[in-house]
Amino acid sequence: MIKVAKHSYILLLFTLFLASSAWAQTNHLNKIISISVTNTSIEELLILISKQGKFNFSYNADIVNGDSVVTFEVNKTSVEKTLNVLFKKRVRYKVVNDHIILLRNYNIQKTGKQSRKSMSSTGYTLTGYVLDANTGQALQNATIYEVDGKISAITNSQGFYMMVLPPDRQFRGVNYCRYDYIDSILFIRPYESMQLDVALKPRHIKIQKIQSKTTLLEPDLKSTTIVNWLVPEEAVTTAKNIRLPELNSMQISLLPFLGSDYKLSGTKTNNLSLNILAGYTGAVDGLELGGGINIVQNDVKGAQLAGFGNVVGKNTRGAQLAGFFNINNGSVTGAQIAGFQNTLNGEMHGVQLSGFNNVTTQNVDGIQATGFVNVAFKDVNMAQLSGFVNYGRNIGGLQATGFVNMATGNVEAAQLAGFVNLSRDVNGLQAAGFVNIANGNIGAAQLAGFVNYCDSVTGAQLAGYVNFARLNVTALQGAGFVNYGSSVTGAQLAGFTNICLNENKGVQISGFLNYAHTLNGLQLAFANFADTVESGLPVGFFSFVRRGYHVVDFSADESFRTNYAFKTGVKKFYNIFKYGRGKNNTAHFAYGLGYLKSFDKHHAVSLDFTTSMISNSDVEEVLMGLMVRFNPTYSYSIFKHLTVFAGPSLNIYGATAKNFSNDFSSIDLYPIWEQTQNDIRMQMWVGLTLGIRI
């Protein structure tokens, strides 16, 4: 809707409108179309082209005669070439937002002399208001742009605008636009200053229902503090409202508001952009050099170099280098290198290098390396290297740092830290100087100077102090103090204690204590404990199996008429703790090992080896000597918990010659061999043992 306040000019407007909700910086002249018509008006032909290309044509009826009839055919040809054939270069083209504007080609046709005489020699003023077509309310921050020059204006809070147009054109194309509104293009032929009020229709935005999820919102370029300081609000608003996809060869700026493109700098794409102190441009397709700061509203394709910092509103393809910082609100494909900090609110495809820290809110498909801290809120597919801290989600390659690595997801290759590693699954190596924590599985090795923690290990878990595997250990678990695993298929080696909460199918070796609920392997320690031994063996000074072998023997033999023995372990290998007393106050304390073979529920044979320390409280020397006994016995089970046994014994006794002469008659019966050497006398005899077992 157009309201005309003054009638001192002629308004000529012809717009072929095709509704479109896209808001992308696309050069419609490059779109490919195919058209074939016979005896059709130019107006109808332009409608067909606009529908196929999904854009709008705007033109002055004095320039293009829409009633002319043509026969026309092109096949898979760009819009620009199609228009060149149709108008034979009498018309030039300007792409603004969703419009292709058809303008008079002044290189071919000259303007009329009469109209130039009628226009002011100093220019004329265009004023008015821009309104919402649905509500009638004033639209603030709408842009009014003279499509053939560098003149623009922004509406204030009342929707008012004012712009001065030079008198060098008979006709002027003026674009009225605002983000989220359908823009309008008017062609005017002025005779004096005028007021023109325009109403813009809102774009109909389709609301899509999406799944609820946590995500990082893409920030607006204006939210960057340094952009707020340097770039005028009007320039940013104009760049947001207007899209000019054609390519400029060059722009030069002293500051963002002092440059060759004036207020329209944020709408232009340049092959070469030169910024002396700081500059602001729409896009770069080539090279941008800045002595201080480069600010780009949209994309960079090529190289961007700044003495201090680079700020890009969207994506960068190529190289971005700055002495201090780089900020990208989109993705980088190539290299992002800064002396201090890189900040990327998109994906990194390539290399991100900085002296202090790197931050990427999306995936890193390449290498992220810095002197201090790397942060990737999503996945890193190759490597993350830092001097102090690395943070990422899934690490597809290497994560290495001098202090702490944190991966909230999985690590495929290796996680190396001077102090602490944190992750879920590690399919390769996790190594730290102090602590490793994996809330998942270790596929190769977990090495720490102090503590390792994980769900399960398929490989090696080695720590200076403690290893803790909440679930399974498949290969090796070695610690200086304690190992803990739910199930072990492999080896558990510890300086003090090994604990297997469920089944041990390998080896448990420790300096003091081993525990396994179910043993199907070997236990070797000072003390071994198990609930059940299915096909294994506990070997140690003391072994206790809850469902194993533990009995009490009462017996008499030729040397000690009363003996009490406790046997514990398993039938294949048990420990013997024995005490006995003989005549003349002699006594012995014995420790030994034994083996029992059952033939059926009644009959069994056992082999016991014991060593005894013999003493006598009536003599000055309490310790009289040592006795070694091999005692095979046959046992018969009378009841379930009562067994009688008997068998011979072979005994070897050794003591000093003095003890032999005084007290040996209290121990031996009939020696079958004796020998004295270096004041040590030894004797051997055969004895007999009788007893009951409970």
Image (tube, rainbow, N blue to C red):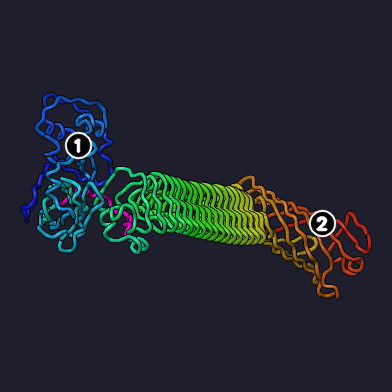
**Residue type at numbered disc 1:** Gln
- Please count the marks in the image: 2
Quarter where residue 478 is shown? bottom right
Q: Look at mark 2 in the image and give the residue it sits on.
A: 651
Graded by Cα atoms within 10 Å as few (under 14), some (14 to 19) or many (20 or more), the crowding at tag 2 reads some
Location of residue 159 in the rendering, given as x and y in whole percent from the top left corner? 15, 60
User: Residue 218 in magenta?
Assistant: yes
Residue 122 visible in the shown view: yes
**Residue type at numbered disc 2:** Asn
Nearer to me, 565 or 281:
281
1 or 2: mark nearer the eye: 1
Nearer to me, 417 or 605:
417
Side (left or right) of 453 relative to 599: left
Graded by Cα atoms within 10 Å as few (under 14), some (14 to 19) or many (20 or more), the crowding at tag 1 reads few
Quarter where residue 326 is shown? bottom left
Query: Mark 1 and mark 2: span between their CA atoms?
Result: 131 Å
Location of residue 431 in the rendering, given as x and y in whole percent from the top left corner? 58, 54
Q: Look at mark 1 in the image and give the residue it sits on.
A: 109
Q: Residue at x 62, y 58 (%)?
A: 479
Q: Could you tell which of marks 1 and 2 lies nearer the N-terminus?
A: 1
Q: Quadrant of the C terminus?
A: bottom right
Nearer to me, 76 or 79:
79
Q: Residue at x 51, y 47 (%)?
A: 397
Side (left or right) of 542 relative to 193: right
Please provide the residue range marked out in magenta.
201-222
Location of residue 548 in the rendering, given as x and y in whole percent from the top left corner? 59, 54
